Amino acid sequence: MPDFDSAYVDSIDDIVGHSEQITYLERFASDVDNGARRKPLLIYGPPGTGKTATSHMLAAEHGWNLVEMSASDYRDAESIASMLHVSSNTRSLFGKINMLLLDEVDELSGKHDEGAAGAINKLIGESKSPIILIANDMWNRKIAFLRGKTDNVEFKRLRNDEVAAVLRNAAKRIGADLSPNVIDGIASRAAGDARSALNDLIVMVGSDDEMLESIGMRDRKSDIFSVLDKIFQSNTLAVPLKAMASSDVDNEMLMKWIDENLPHRYLQKEDLRDAYRMLAMASGFNSRASRSQYYTYWRYMNVMMSSGVALSKSSYPDSRMRYSFPKVISSLSGTKESRGLQTELAKKLQKKVHMSIKEIKSSVLPLLSSAANLAVQRDGSESVYDFFASRFDMTDNEVKGILAIRG
């Protein structure tokens, strides 16, 4: 499996869909090369839009020495000081400019990352080296301390044709012979996330076209979030119900998401009381449908959990607030031992797919499991065990763990 930054682009000119943003980054780099001191850049946008890959290519093409940290690295002021402050005021061993890259900066946790915000502020104030910070959401309250201290560059979600262009370029580079239908199918399922699409591309290499169905069956958060937005941000009967009807999100799954996020969205006691009453009625109709096998009850369930919840509020919630994954689902994901094994598997895969541990566990591992189980049925288990051992240095027990995962 290739490194995904290298599969993505040969040069910064190959970055798809962000020509204006890249022009701005090039101007930033030229100013730095000419001795100007620039504000740090905050590059923000949805996952998989090329933020990190573009930053890497910018450093490479200007001959800068890349000094990179992710959220798992800067847990406190001491770690930031020990890893970055020396680089921020010196050049590399060979006289190159050091570029400081702080990835996933909006993943800082105020509870656990004590002193990190202050240390980053100090770094910005004292650094003689260029700094780029990367975030999914620039309005996240965790990085409110950066307001006014950065120049902000937005990377928007890619269109399907742009994702397809990324896939064609990557397929050509790694010598993968995939049909246009497969390329377009992957792109349409990726919801603008090129990194996710590249992961899917690798899975499809050497697989039958039927493997596309496994990719399509994955529970995409973007779809759930779209329905939740219509419920929490609408104040009509039709919009939430239409959004739910046109979505392929499982209704019981959606009910769990609404239940988890209601207390963070509806802050008035009366609103919360009325919304939970609607949700309870929806749950009741769902139970009746299951017991009686009379599924007309689902019509009432759908109305209660979508339009009923939407019309229970007296004011609109903060639309910038992130959605929380349902704890009840997390608690059912397996025993402590199996969750620990999945974390270890994710760490091994992280070097290849350039995603967070959390993203790998929720998205990549279920997809790999589906692909591996199909391969076992087609080619036998021995080839699958050999593949994971040779590519990822996985033990038999770890491969068994992958095969046992269910999305």
Image (tube, rainbow, N blue to C red):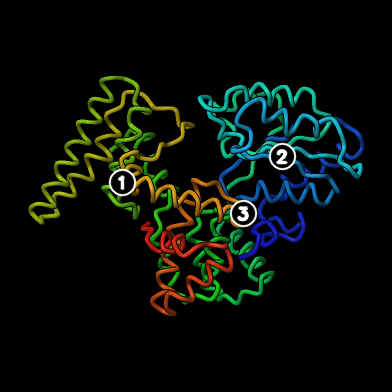
Q: Could you tell me which quadrant the N terminus lies in?
A: bottom right
Q: Please tell me the numbered disc located at residue 332.
A: 1
Task: Tell me the distance, in whole angstroms, between the alpha carbons under discs 3 and 1.
Answer: 28 Å
Nearer the observer, disc 2 or disc 1?
Answer: 1
Judge from the rendering whether residue 49 lies leftward or rightward of residue 94; answer left or right: left
Q: Earlier in the sequence, mark 3 or mark 2?
A: 2
Mark 3 and mark 2: span between their CA atoms? 17 Å
With respect to residue 138, does 187 lie above or below?
below
Where does residue 374 sit, x and y in percent of width and height? Answer: 41, 72
The image position of residue 70, as x and y in percent, is 63, 40
Label 2 SS: strand
Q: Is residue 215 visible?
A: no
The residue lying toward the viewer, choosing from 135 and 397, is: 397
Badge 2 is on which residue? 101
In which quadrant will I find the C terminus?
bottom left
Q: Is residue 247 left or right of residue 319?
A: left
Residue marked by disc 3: 351
Q: Position of residue 164 (x, y in %)?
A: 59, 64
- Looking at the rendered structure, the kind of residue marked 3 is Lys
Badge 1: how crowded within 10 Å, few (<14), some, or many (20+)?
few
Of the pair 93 and 110, the residue shown nearer to us: 93
**If you read the primary sequence from the N terminus, does the residue marked by circle 2 or circle 1 appear first?**
2
For the point 64% across and 58% down, which residue is it? 4
Secondary element at image label 1: loop
Q: Quick one: label 3, few (<14), some, or many (20+) residues within 10 Å?
A: few
Question: Is the C-beta separation of discs 3 and 2 under 8 Å?
Answer: no
Q: Please give the name of the residue rendered at 74% of the width and 26% of the height, measured from the top-left corner.
A: 123
Figure check: 282 above or below 208 = above
